[in-house]
Amino acid sequence: MAIVLPKTRKGENSRAAILNAALDLFRERGYEATTMRAIADLAGVSLGGSYHYFPSKEHLVLEFYRHTHELHLVAIAPLLAREKDLGSRLRGTVRAVVITCEPFHAVAGSIFSTVANPSSPLNPFGGAARPLREEVVALYAEVVKGSDARIPADIAEMLPLTLWLYQMAILYFWIFDRSPGRLRTLEVIDETTELIVRLLGLANLPVLRSSRKRILGLVRSVAGGSIA
Amino acid sequence: MAIVLPKTRKGENSRAAILNAALDLFRERGYEATTMRAIADLAGVSLGGSYHYFPSKEHLVLEFYRHTHELHLVAIAPLLAREKDLGSRLRGTVRAVVITCEPFHAVAGSIFSTVANPSSPLNPFGGAARPLREEVVALYAEVVKGSDARIPADIAEMLPLTLWLYQMAILYFWIFDRSPGRLRTLEVIDETTELIVRLLGLANLPVLRSSRKRILGLVRSVAGGSIA
DNA sequence: GCTCTAACTTGAACATGTTCAAATTCAGCG
DNA sequence: CGCTGAATTTGAACATGTTCAAGTTAGAGC
């Protein structure tokens, strides 16, 4: 079950060939229609070969996800360097997620399903996925911090984690979106990011004070138990 | 693929035996560890027999849903007949969900992951689960309607569906909850239901008017595309 | 009671993810 | 060059969800 890293040049080649074959076939046929035998054939290794570097078919999907995360980082770097408005930063970042993931829309369901399984070590709330999760949370921390919005400290503390959860919800919506160009998802992103910014602005209203405390306590409690 | 209903007494017995065997084994060993062969053995039919009444192993899970849903209905009937306060009705209803599902807590994770896959016929947003989903939404409509709370019409329209989504979120939290007696989930239910009632009370604040419109439009849009 | 048909049941066969013991390769070393 | 041990590779074997053609049963109609 442990992930074995290649120790030789030859091993590196094999691992890369397997991964590329898997990514190509996933994109071309989808996850379920891609058999481990087809991956092995295309990679030029035997059936068992893949299991030397990837403990399971699902682990190949996770490599897929890691790949898109890196594409995402590259895609939004200019925006984050330039833009100061929180709404624009948030909208651009989340839009970039779904745009980056677009080539993999057909596979995304299986990714999500894999990732949603609480008993899997790959669960985003669990330990194994922790580095990647923290990278994404840190990204949202930067989205907020690099803006000119003044966020109260108690909210700022929990906001990145909340935005990460929000992104997961958007991705789940996106998986179901069959509209051309995934326009509906983009619309929902525009609506929700604007809503988030507006609600942040309203958070200091006296009448909302107690709800704010309650919500923050809730987020803290949920995050504290399941994630941290 | 079509679901075949038994036409004879013998058929009814077989179907019931298969279903009972499946529920018992799911509860005892979990979803993945329960093989179709074990189900068939325990039910006293041959391997292929199950497929006459249940198109797939996942469809047996759907029956499991229905089973717990019916237990849930029975559990909350007295409360809904007696209580008029919205917060109490909501809290009691959602508490009853997790209490009803408690015997299946260990299984719930793998079931959730199976079912979260959008390509699964059992996906709660998809077609096969539609009748059951509509029953649950109708239940929440009754929770609201039978209360003495006065809910604006535009909110009342989308509230049951939103509460169903909320229930799903609670269930996902519950899956991760390792606290004794699942006390943390119950606490979160108490917190969130009170928050929901409070926010409903605030919905008429002028300053929230535009956010309210936005949120309702969002829910309507999300529901219209993926679910209805 | 006999026949016929639809309902029901069977289990071998298949597809595919996974395992694992054995075979092969290869770089380093004397 | 030949040896050695680790890294890599192999493919047969296994487990399990699913299919399906063939067999069996039971009840309606006569």
Image (spheres, coloured by chain):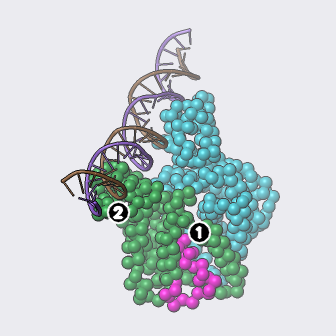
Chain colours: A green, B cyan, C purple, D brown
Q: Position of residue D4 (x, y in %)?
A: 33, 53
Q: Is residue A134 visible?
A: yes
The residue to which callout 1 is attached is A227
Q: Nearer the viewer, residue A71 or B67?
A: A71
Indicate whether A214 appears above or below B59: below
Q: Nearer the viewer, mark 2 or mark 1?
A: 2
Q: Amino acid at mark 2?
A: Lys
Q: Which chain does the residue under circle 2 lie in?
A: A
Q: Position of residue B162 (x, y in %)?
A: 61, 65
Residues at marks 2 and 1 on the same chain: yes
Left of B62 or right of it: where is A15? left
Is residue A161 on the magenta stretch?
yes
Left of A30 or right of it: where is B118? right
- Which of the 4 quarters of the picture holds residue A208? bottom right
Indicate whether A159 appears above or below B29: below
Magenta stretch, main secondary structure, is helix
Q: What's the magenta region?
A: A144-167
Q: Is residue B4 visible?
A: no
Q: Amino acid at mark 1?
A: Ile
Is residue A105 on the magenta stretch?
no
- Which of the 4 quarters of the picture holds residue D8? bottom left
Indicate whether B210 appears above or below A51: below
Answer with mark 2 or mark 1, whichever residue precedes in sequence.
2
Q: Nearer the viewer, residue C30 or B120?
A: C30
- Label 2 element class: loop
The circle drawn on residue A7 is 2
The circle drawn on residue B15 is none
